[in-house]
Image (spheres, coloured by chain):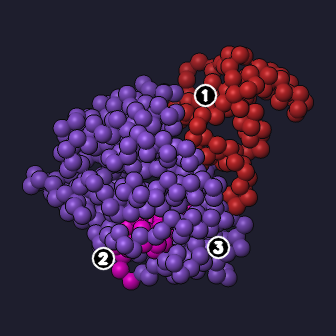
Amino acid sequence: MTTDGRSNGNAGAAGRKPLHNPLGLLAELTHRCPLGCPYCSNPLEMDKRENELDAATWARVFREAAGLGVLQVHLSGGEPASRRDLADIIAAACSAGLYTNLITSGVGITDQRLNELADTGLDHVQISIQDSEPNSADRIAGYEGAYARKRALASAVVALKLPLTVNIVIHRANIARIDELVAMALDMGASRVEIAHVQYYGWALKNRASLMPTREQVVQAIGRIEPLRKQHHGRIVIDAVVPDYYARFPKPCVGGWGRRSLNVTPAGRVLPCHAAESIPGLEFWSVKDHSLREIWEQNPAFNAFRGTDFLPEPCQSCERREVDFGGCRCQAFALTGDARATDPVCNLSPHHHVVEEQTAIRGDTGYVYRRL
Amino acid sequence: MNTPAAAPSIPPEAHPRLPRGVRLVHNEAQGGWVLLAPERVFKADPIAAEIVKRCTGEASFEAIVDDLAKTFGAPRERVLTDVTALLQGLADKKLLEL
């Protein structure tokens, strides 16, 4: 079984390669969130509550997504439970036939509310947790008591026999505890755990010096993954996202720009990835004005970095061109000022020294928390 | 991918089933059968789909193997080996309950 698959190719401009069908839709229901994590992945400029799409519009978006071939919807934010109509939104996603995944901070969902959400047909819950040490977890989240509340919600999810993924964002404050973090996920009853090193965009860039681990810490943490997979074989799936500042090659960000997934912001703008608005000069269309199919096929912003034709050297003649698509466009822009450049985390990039310089900067000035 | 050292075996009386959060669906746009799982999508070839379709928790493993051998006119030993490998692989990924 593979995850590859191509569309019937009836889309796109003449002469262009057939478009893939998107597989996944990230639905950011709101940017509101009770936590203040220093690596917050919400954009620097957040959508206001009064501009959030209503449940009926989300229902239309889900039907259009299913029509485009999308199989899974990830309901995220912000904290999706900040929406009072979350149960209606989940029900709409389920009735569109989508596999429905709730990505939550675990703060703000009562047991009664969880029962309601589970009854709508929700398929899966992902809870983020900041550390296996309660005090450290609360300090990272900037929220007293967050750890205990997340553990309580996890128990309730497992009691309902809903599958649980635990997501742990890794950085200097918790990187030494990979074994303990996986043990915690097992203890929470998760069938899957994501060990996800911080990606340095947006808000995380403000805290880079406080979050950045050393190369030795990263090497040690990565070295724990395979032994832990062996140790817990058949009991928990361990997915690890590599810390790309210390990688030799870039990641194939979102599986390639406009290739496998799309993202809808709380106010309805459709993006190839959640950070895409950090790149200036791209005009993103809204579901208020266009169907999802029109946007996927025709929005110039989706076509801006589709495929590999736009890539400069050393990507253009690189054998990994179709593997990583030159890496992340947002990171290329953030670190070089040119969104078409080779992602500078690649050791072949002429700008790679920028990454090496940044990883060397570490400080303990304290976190700049994300507050609304 | 991890593979156990010994050849896997599944008890004949096991009743394999997809857990909540794992679904086999047919999708034209994605070109056939797909197994949907927590934040993962696996394309299933037609044979894998025939096997997984039978994992409803009602039929025993033994009955599933018998049925597949009969339906496809294949030697039972061969079917047993193939089905065991597929289902054990799925179980290891938490995509199947045995």
Q: Is residue A268 magenta?
A: yes
**Residue A246 image position (x, y, % from top left):** 30, 52
- Chain A takes which shade in the image? purple
Q: Which residue is mark 2?
A: A337
Image side of residue B77 versus residue A325, left or right: right
On residue A141, which mark appears? none
CB under 8 Å between discs 1 and 3: no
- Amino acid type shown at disc 3: Lys
* Mark 3 surroundings: few (<14), some (14-19) or many (≥20) residues within 10 A: few
Label located before the other in sequence (2 or 3): 3
**Residue A90 image position (x, y, % from top left):** 53, 54
Query: Is residue A122 placed above or below B14 in the rendered structure?
Result: below
**Segment colored magenta:** A256-281
The local secondary structure at tag 1 comes to loop
- Amino acid type shown at disc 1: Glu
Mark in front: 1 vs 3:
1
Q: Chain of mark 3?
A: A
Q: Which residue is mark 1?
A: B97
* Mark 1 surroundings: few (<14), some (14-19) or many (≥20) residues within 10 A: some
Residue drawn at x 30%, y 30% is A180
Q: Nearer the viewer, residue B65 or A148?
A: A148
- Amino acid type shown at disc 2: Gly
Q: Which residue is mark 3?
A: A17
